[in-house]
Every structure is written in structure tokens, then in C-alpha cells.
């Protein structure tokens, strides 16, 4: 799951980022409304944590623009404004939940989990060649034997399985697997693909390199 935090208070932003990353979410953080609007216009997220009092563009305007683009991503508003009118305005603009500062980290994490459950598509199961994948349980079997995947390898496998027959570029893979502030080496994508390929090839599933374009998932070797 990839989450965007738009919060201009450095201490709060850092604390929320640490809490979410500690629960294995990929988290990007921006400190202004302009940066939030730009990120949301060009990147895909599973959840937005949006402060109302952002510099540049306030959170209400960021939310209005997001919904005007017909983006259904769940939005949790964080704000020091506790008036009923402010809550109503945020919800009318398309927010999914509202949390007034100060708040407990436990409540914040519970609301995040609830919104991600609400916005998530039903977990799928796949049977490809000699491989079975249970996305909900995060279990994979290759020729009947369980195989361990890292969180990155799971994300990469699900990306391929949900885009069958489509060549995925390195940029598309990076956008799905890495956050803004992660430093990518030139061969980081190749390393992750190679490790996943090694683990699933005994089942006859194949990730083919399309030179100059990216990678193509093939259910079985031809």
C-alpha cells in the first residue's frame, strides 16, 4: 500500500511517517499544498493523509482538485479546525474521514486500516502454470512447495499478475514499488525482477525482458 502524507508540521509528519512505515506501508511525505496537488496529479496512491492548513494551497483546495479529476483515492483529513462547519465542508468536498488534532497514534493507525480496507479491491487468487498465489494470505506455492517472497517481491509479483500481457517499463515498476525519497541504483529494478524470476521459474512462469521497453509477464514458457 502506498500512502501520501501532506503535512507541514515537520515533527508530526515525521512521526506519522515512522508509524506507517513501521506497519510496512510505503509512505511519501510532502509539506505544501502545491507539492501535494502535483504528487496526486502524477502518481497513484492507495490513501491520502491530508492536513487542511497547508501553505500554498490549503487542504480543501487540494481535495477539491483531486475529486475534480475523478480520482477515488480515500482521503483522511487532519486538522486543528474542530468546528462542525469545517468537518461538513471537508466531507462534502469528498473526504472519507476526519481526524482533529491532537489525536492518538493508535486511533490514527486504526482509521488508516479502515480506509485502506474500504478502498481495497477484493484480494485475488491466481493459478498460473505450476504456481498458486493467494494474495490475501500472502502465500505462494511453486510445484506444491511454499516459497518465501520479500514485501517488494510480493508487490512486484502482484503488479505483473494484474497486468497480464502488458509490458511494464522500469519507470512504471519504480512508481509502484518505491517512494519519492528512496535512492534507486541503476540496477535496482533488474535485481528485484531477477530475484523474483529465480523463485517462480521452476513453476513454468516467466518474466521476459523486452529489450528497450521493460518486462512482460508470461504464464508459461513457450
Image (spheres, rainbow, N blue to C red):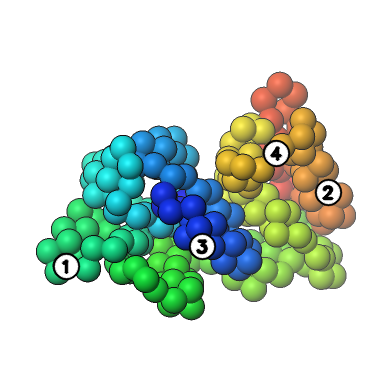
Label 1: few (<14), some (14–19) or many (≥20) C-alpha neighbours in 10 Å: few
Q: Nearer the viewer, residue 117 or 108?
A: 108
**Left or right of 207 on screen, residue 21:** left
> Mark 4 sits on what residue?
183
**Left or right of 55 on screen, residue 152:** right
Q: Position of residue 113 (x, y in %)?
A: 47, 71
Q: Which mark is nearer the camera, 2 or 4?
A: 4
Residues at marks 2 and 4, CA–CA distance in whole angstroms: 19 Å
Residue drawn at point x = 44 percent, y = 35 percent: 42
Q: Give whichever of discs 3 and 2 has the lower sequence position.
A: 3
Residue drawn at point x = 16 percent, y = 58 percent: 89
Image: 206 above or below 91:
above
Q: Give whichever of discs 2 and 4 has the lower sequence position.
A: 4
Q: Secondary structure at mark 3?
A: helix
- Outermost residue, top side: 212
Q: Nearer the viewer, residue 156 or 124?
A: 156
Q: Nearer the viewer, residue 20 or 217?
A: 20
> Mark 3 sits on what residue?
16
Residues at marks 4 and 3, CA–CA distance in whole angstroms: 21 Å
Q: What label sits on residue 83 in the rendered view? A: 1
Q: What label sits on residue 195 in the rendered view? A: 2
Image: 222 above or below 143:
above
Amino acid at each position: 500500500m502506498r500512502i501520501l502524507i501532506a503535512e507541514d508540521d515537520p515533527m508530526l509528519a515525521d512521526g506519522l511517517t515512522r508509524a506507517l512505515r513501521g506497519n510496512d506501508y510505503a509512505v511519501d511525505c510532502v509539506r505544501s499544498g502545491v507539492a501535494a496537488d502535483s504528487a496526486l496529479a502524477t502518481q497513484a496512491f492507495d490513501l491520502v493523509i491530508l492536513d487542511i492548513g497547508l501553505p500554498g494551497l490549503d487542504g480543501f483546495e487540494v481535495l477539491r482538485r483531486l475529486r475534480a479529476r475523478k480520482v477515488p483515492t480515500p482521503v483522511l483529513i487532519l486538522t486543528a479546525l474542530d468546528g462542525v462547519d469545517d468537518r461538513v465542508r471537508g466531507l462534502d468536498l469528498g473526504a472519507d474521514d476526519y481526524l482533529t488534532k491532537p489525536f492518538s497514534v493508535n486511533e490514527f493507525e486504526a482509521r488508516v486500516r479502515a480506509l485502506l480496507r474500504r478502498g481495497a479491491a477484493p484480494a485475488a487468487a491466481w493459478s498460473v502454470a505450476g504456481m498458486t498465489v493467494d494474495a490475501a494470505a500472502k502465500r505462494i506455492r511453486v510445484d506444491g512447495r511454499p516459497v518465501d517472497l520479500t514485501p517488494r517481491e510480493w508487490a512486484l509479483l502482484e503488479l505483473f499478475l494484474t497486468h497480464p500481457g502488458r509490458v511494464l517499463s522500469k519507470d512504471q515498476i519504480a512508481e509502484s514499488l518505491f517512494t519519492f525519497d528512496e535512492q534507486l541504483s541503476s540496477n535496482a529494478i533488474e535485481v528485484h525482477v531477477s530475484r523474483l524470476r529465480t523463485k517462480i521459474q521452476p513453476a513454468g512462469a516467466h518474466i521476459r525482458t523486452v529489450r528497450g521497453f521493460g518486462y512482460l509477464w508470461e504464464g508459461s514458457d513457450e
